[in-house]
Every structure is written in structure tokens, then in C-alpha cells.
Image (cartoon, grey):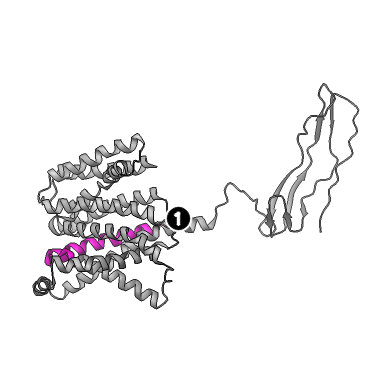
């Protein structure tokens, strides 16, 4: 039933101010049928009740020309849902989907950091017993590729729809990713995990340098100022590192440069390619594996691998096989989760999360491997990481 309300008749007897109190009766609830508001395209599926319907009065006045001014104190009503009789407050109404999205992002971040810490621990254990970073890097990519191929074959994950243009665009990204991955592994085979990640926190400096010199981009003043603590902190940490190794230092630096180019190639070449983060990284792993395998064989070779493997198993025992499998699996999983999180968060949030990830890895590795750290070295690491955080804020 639709209720029709009629306004009282108002007679005008004075040209200055005309006011009349309404005599409409007030009702506690007036029931309306479901309404479709065509102007705002809003459908209210539940019937509404009008509570405390009251006409406080109609006050009209005229100006000097005899025209009516605006009306004030018109009808005031409040809307309630039919079942709960609770007022509908748009300001305090929280969308359930947004809450679920925040929880999902939080789970992504916690999983990303946890998997990354576990990977770095097992990776360092493997490299301490089996100092062959090229093969270790190859096994990481091979395990990830195998996991995704099985997932696609068993329909656990939907295979991406790719074409030749997609793989052509992905090729330079895969080249940069392969170089960065191997360089970081070489670095961790020579120095402490904490030192590698301290140097890798200087990646924003490489990003600004490459973007400015090669791409002609300019950045806000705050971005350039944030590079001062990044470069200064990394330099301080490197100078005061007790177990400094030039190969380890250069490996981390090359990894920074390679990952900057990976990001640039990814932004430029992958625009318009509709592939999810999980499948994108899977394709990247497969192509990187194809590129890396012949170089790994040429640099190290099966003979060295066989001798090194036998020596590691004799020293560590069967646990060494578990270490190799764990570092390979966790490498793929932490990268996969990080790429999946990019589908849900902004680049700024991802950058902040990446900074916090390095902190968790540095602290965990120092505790687990009992890495000796001088106070000045720790100060340099803190300054570099803080500069990275400032960079992520200033760039936005």
C-alpha cells in the first residue's frame, strides 16, 4: 500500500511574513512498500517505516518584489529497516567487502614476510654446505616452474591465455630477473644474509639513477633527499662489515641494478597483458629457467655439482636434501605471494611492505646465524632502511 500525504491549504493574508502551523496528525509509523528511486537508481529491497513523522511548520516570506523566499522547517523523517527498526546511518555503515579485503591484504603481507624469512635461512644453509650459487638459483626456478605446470595440468590453477607477443614482451623482464636472482644468490654465498639485504635496500637509489639518466624522468625534491640516508647508510654498513667480501658486495649491487631494469621492462612491455600476478610470475620463472640453465652448466658444470653434492651429504646428512627442497619451494612461494599481493595493493603499499620485509629478514638472520654486528654497522643498516621508507613515501 502506498500512503499519500496531502499538504494543508495555506492562505496568504500578509505580504511580509506568512507562517501557518500544520495541523497534520503525527503517526508513530507509516508503512511504505518497497520503493525504486529512479533518479538515483537505488533499489531498497526491504519495506521502510517512517518514524516520528512531524510537520514542524511551513514558513514563507516575501521579498521587496513580492516573490516568495525559500521554505524552511519542512518535513523531517527518519528511515528504519522493517526488521530491526534501526536507523540507517550512511556515515557509519561499513562495507563488508572492504573489511574482507583488508584482512586478505594482511594475510598476504604476513605470508610474504614469513616465507621470505624461511627461504633466506634455508638458502644460506644450503650455500654454506654447497657453495654453488648458479645451480642453487637454477633449482629454485625449476621447482617453481614444476609447481605451476602441475597446477595448470591438474586444474588447481587456471592456465593463462598467452600468445607470442606476451612471451616477446616478457623476455627482457626474464633476462633482468635471471641476472638479479643469480647475483643475489652469489652475494649470499660470500657474505652474511643481513649484509646482502642491507646493500639491497639501496635499490631505490639505482631506480632513481637509471630513470633519470636513461629515461629522462624527474622526481620531487623529497625523493632525491631520501637517497642521502640510503646511500650513506649502505656505505656505513659496508665499511664496518666484519666479514666484508668484494664479490658478495658486487653481487648485491648487480642484483639491485638488474631488478630496477626488471621493473622498468615490466611496466613498459606488459601493459595491456591481462595475466594475474600468480600466472605472471609462473611464466617469468619458466622463461628465466630456460635462460639460466645453459649458463649454470657452463659456469659450474655437472662434475663440480656431483663432487659438491657428495661432500655436502656426507657432512650434513639427509637433512641437506630437505634444505635444498625447502629453499627451492619457499623461493617460489614467497615471490608468488608478493606478485599476487600486487593485484590487491598500491605500489606505495607494496614498497613499504618490501622495506618491512628486509627488516624481518635482517633481524631473523642475525639471530639464527648469530652474525656478529657492530653498533656502527647496525646504525648504518637502520639509516639505509629508514631512507628506503622515506623514499617510498616521497615518491608518491
Does 351 sit above or below residue 327?
Answer: above
> Which residue is identified by label 1?
102
Does 5 sit above or below residue 289?
Answer: above
Report helix, strand or loop for mark 1: helix
Q: Quadrant of residue 360?
A: bottom left
User: Which residue in the rendered view is the most extreme toward the bottom?
Assistant: 154
Using the image as rendered, state which of residue 232 and residue 88 is in the foreground.
Answer: 232
In the image, residue 366 lies at what x, y percent? 18, 54
In the image, residue 30 lies at what x, y percent? 78, 53
Q: On the rendered structure, is 52 left or right of 370?
A: right
Using the image as rendered, state which of residue 41 and residue 377 is in the foreground.
Answer: 41
Who's the residue at 83% across and 27% down the image?
Answer: 67
Who's the residue at 12% across and 47% down the image?
Answer: 241
In the image, residue 150 lies at what x, y percent? 35, 76
Q: Give the magenta part as a residue range.
A: 106-135
Q: Quadrant for the N terminus, please.
A: bottom right
Q: Is residue 107 visible?
A: no
Q: Is residue 30 visible?
A: yes
Q: Main secondary structure of the magenta part?
A: helix
Who's the residue at 36% across and 64% down the image?
Answer: 167
Amino acid at each position: 500500500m502506498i500512503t499519500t500525504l496531502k499538504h494543508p491549504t495555506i492562505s496568504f493574508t500578509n505580504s511580509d511574513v506568512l507562517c501557518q502551523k500544520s495541523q497534520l496528525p503525527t503517526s508513530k509509523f507509516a508503512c511504505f512498500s518497497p520503493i525504486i528511486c529512479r533518479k538515483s537508481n537505488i533499489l531498497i529491497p526491504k519495506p521502510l517505516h517512517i518514524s516520528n513523522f512531524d510537520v514542524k511548520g511551513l514558513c514563507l516570506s516575501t521579498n521587496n518584489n513580492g516573490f516568495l523566499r525559500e521554505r524552511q522547517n519542512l518535513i523531517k523523517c527518519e528511515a528504519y529497516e522493517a526488521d530491526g527498526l534501526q536507523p540507517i546511518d550512511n556515515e557509519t555503515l561499513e562495507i563488508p567487502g572492504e573489511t574482507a579485503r583488508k584482512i586478505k591484504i594482511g594475510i598476504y603481507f604476513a605470508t610474504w614476510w614469513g616465507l621470505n624469512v624461511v627461504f633466506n635461512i634455508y638458502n644460506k644453509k644450503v650455500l654454506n654446505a654447497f657453495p654453488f650459487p648458479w645451480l642453487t638459483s637454477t633449482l629454485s626456478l625449476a621447482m617453481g616452474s614444476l609447481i605451476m605446470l602441475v597446477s595448470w595440468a591438474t586444474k588447481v590453477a587456471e592456465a593463462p591465455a598467452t600468445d607470442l607477443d606476451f612471451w616477446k614482451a616478457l623476455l627482457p623482464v626474464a633476462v633482468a630477473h635471471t641476472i638479479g636472482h643469480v647475483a643475489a644468490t652469489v652475494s649470499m654465498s660470500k657474505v652474511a644474509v643481513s649484509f646482502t639485504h642491507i646493500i639491497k635496500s639501496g635499490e631505490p637509489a639505482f631506480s632513481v639513477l637509471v630513470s633519470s639518466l636513461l629515461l629522462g624522468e624527474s622526481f620531487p625534491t623529497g625523493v632525491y633527499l631520501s637517497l642521502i640516508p640510503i646511500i650513506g647508510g649502505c656505505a656505513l654498513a659496508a665499511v664496518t662489515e666484519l666479514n666484508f667480501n668484494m664479490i658478495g658486495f658486487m653481487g648485491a649491487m648487480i642484483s639491485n641494478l638488474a631488478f630496477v631494469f626488471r621493473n622498468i621492462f615490466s611496466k613498459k612491455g606488459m601493459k595491456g597483458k591481462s595475466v594475474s600476478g600468480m600466472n605472471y610470475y609462473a611464466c617469468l620463472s619458466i622463461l628465466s629457467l630456460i635462460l639460466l640453465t645453459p649458463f649454470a652448466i657452463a659456469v659450474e658444470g655437472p662434475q663440480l655439482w656431483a663432487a659438491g653434492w657428495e661432500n655436502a651429504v656426507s657432512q650434513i646428512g639427509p637433512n641437506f636434501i630437505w634444505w635444498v627442497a625447502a629453499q627451492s619451494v619457499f623461493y617460489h612461494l614467497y615471490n608468488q605471494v608478493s606478485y599476487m599481493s600486487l593485484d590487491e595493493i598500491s605500489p606505495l603499499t607494496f614498497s613499504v611492505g618490501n622495506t618491512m620485509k628486509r627488516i624481518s629478514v635482517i633481524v631473523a638472520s642475525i639471530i639464527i646465524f648469530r652474525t656478529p654486528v657492530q653498533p656502527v654497522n647496525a646504525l648504518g643498516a637502520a639509516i639505509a632502511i629508514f631512507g628506503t621508507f622515506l623514499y617510498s613515501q616521497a615518491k608518491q
